[in-house]
Image (cartoon, rainbow, N blue to C red):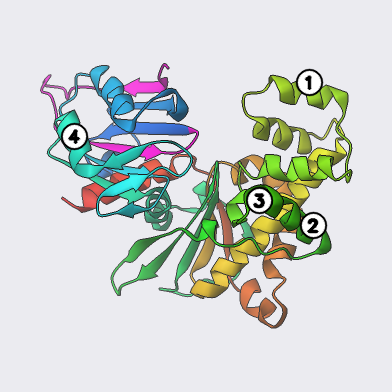
């Protein structure tokens, strides 16, 4: 349960300990933590680490281990968490963690802890990105002050949005990824029926997310729509998580695998349709941003036209959608940096 990619600058030039903010991005697969002294130093954390979430019984235990490894005077925290935050309490959607602001502050000896939805954290970071942190799928024409939509497929799928208050953008959380999955063709209708037999309610997350990719794969295999090669079956049997195996195989240009490519094709179509659903509901004239861990890893598949075909296929509203800019966020630390910015904004 070691820390990965750790960087530490624990004291200033005088050797004095500095009171600092702990920022975090707690997700179903991994939790990233970093300690910062100001909003102007987000590119140089005092300490930083990434942990496998499922290896810990609680977020308290994970943070306590991180803080114990560094002699830094942290007095407050702002944490983005993968789940709805209600009255200062959150239940992580894909983990058995229940997190409460007051309890976390008391157990860690912090003056305050603020929990925000992880997609609200990503959304908070969006206005601060320039072209170097983005890959544009559709240039469009952004309206000044227009609402911005954010969709992020990772372990689950998160959705959020930003509205302009006359002076700045403000981020808002959503649990839209748990709304009903809406199939757009015959194959997806069959997939919906197959999933309903297994889960009852079928949300968008059951398809358009990292946890949904194995569902699509099993559907294709189980219904005989595609065969599973023996070499792939062995790789999947040995893998702790089948999603990276399926995705990496699908985008591998040197090896053809019909079932993996068909899986990714359905995933992209479902993601494109759901992203435009959110864009229409919000009238996202300020732009649409794809975050999360998956989009940057499948850029070739997102840029070949299939995503935008699904995104813009909205009948009478195709002209409106083609005017909306669509970008992929390339920065994997978006939620972490957004949580830090939110924490410093409350000073």
Mark 3 or mark 2, whichever is nearer to me:
2
Query: Which circle's residue, 3 or 4, is located before the other in the chain?
Result: 4
Q: Which residue is mark 3?
A: 207
- State the CA–CA distance, disc 3 to disc 1: 24 Å
For this orientation, the residue located farthest to the bottom is: 316
Decide: few, some or many residues near mark 2? Use Cα within 10 Å; few <14, some 14-19, many ≥20.
some
Magenta region includes residue 6: yes
Which residues are the magenta region?
A: 1-29
Mark 2 or mark 1, whichever is nearer to me:
2
Magenta region includes residue 214: no
| Up-down relation of residue 63 to residue 111 (above or below) | above
Residue 251 in sight: no
Q: Position of residue 260 (x, y in %)?
A: 79, 39
SS at badge 2: helix
Decide: few, some or many residues near mark 1? Use Cα within 10 Å; few <14, some 14-19, many ≥20.
few
Mark 3 or mark 4, whichever is nearer to me:
3
- State the CA–CA distance, disc 2 to disc 1: 27 Å
Query: Which circle's residue, 2 or 4, is located before the other in the chain?
Result: 4
SS at badge 4: strand
Q: Which residue is mark 4?
A: 20
- State the CA–CA distance, disc 2 to disc 4: 52 Å
Query: Which circle's residue, 4 or 1, is located before the other in the chain?
Result: 4
Q: Which residue is mark 1?
A: 234
Q: Which residue is mark 2?
A: 190
């Amino acid at each position: 349960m070691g820390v990965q990619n750790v960087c530490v600058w624990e004291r200033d030039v005088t050797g004095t300990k500095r009171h600092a903010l702990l920022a975090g991005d707690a997700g179903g697969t991994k939790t990233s933590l970093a300690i910062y002294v100001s909003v102007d130093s987000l590119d140089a954390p005092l300490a930083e680490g990434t942990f496998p979430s499922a290896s810990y019984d609680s977020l308290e235990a994970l943070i306590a281990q991180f803080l114990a490894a560094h002699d830094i005077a942290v007095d407050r925290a702002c944490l983005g968490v993968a789940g709805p935050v209600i009255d200062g309490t959150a239940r992580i959607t894909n983990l058995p963690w229940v997190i409460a602001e007051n309890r976390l502050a008391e157990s860690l000896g912090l003056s305050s802890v603020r929990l925000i939805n992880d997609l609200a954290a990503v959304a908070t970071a969006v206005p601060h990105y320039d072209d170097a942190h983005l890959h544009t799928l559709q240039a469009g024409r952004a309206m000044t002050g227009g609402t911005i939509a954010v969709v992020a497929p990772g372990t689950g799928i998160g959705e959020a949005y930003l509205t302009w208050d006359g002076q700045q953008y403000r981020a808002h959380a959503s649990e839209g990824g748990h709304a009903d999955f809406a199939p757009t063709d015959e194959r997806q209708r069959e997939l919906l029926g197959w999933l309903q037999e297994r889960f009852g309610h079928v949300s968008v997350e059951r398809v358009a997310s990292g946890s949904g990719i194995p569902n699509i794969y099993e559907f294709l295999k189980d219904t005989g729509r595609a065969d599973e090669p023996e070499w792939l079956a062995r790789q999947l049997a040995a893998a702790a998580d089948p999603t990276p195996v399926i995705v990496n195989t699908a985008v591998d240009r040197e090896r053809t695998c019909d079932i993996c490519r068909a899986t990714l094709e359905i995933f992209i179509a479902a993601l494109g349709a759901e992203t435009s659903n959110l864009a229409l509901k919000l009238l996202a004239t300020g732009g649409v941003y794809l975050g999360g861990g998956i989009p940057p890893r499948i850029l070739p598949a997102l840029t070949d036209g299939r995503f935008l075909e699904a995104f813009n296929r909205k009948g009478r509203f195709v002209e409106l959608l083609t005017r909306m800019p669509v970008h992929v966020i390339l920065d994997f630390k978006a939620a972490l940096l957004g949580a830090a910015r939110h924490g410093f904004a409350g000073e």
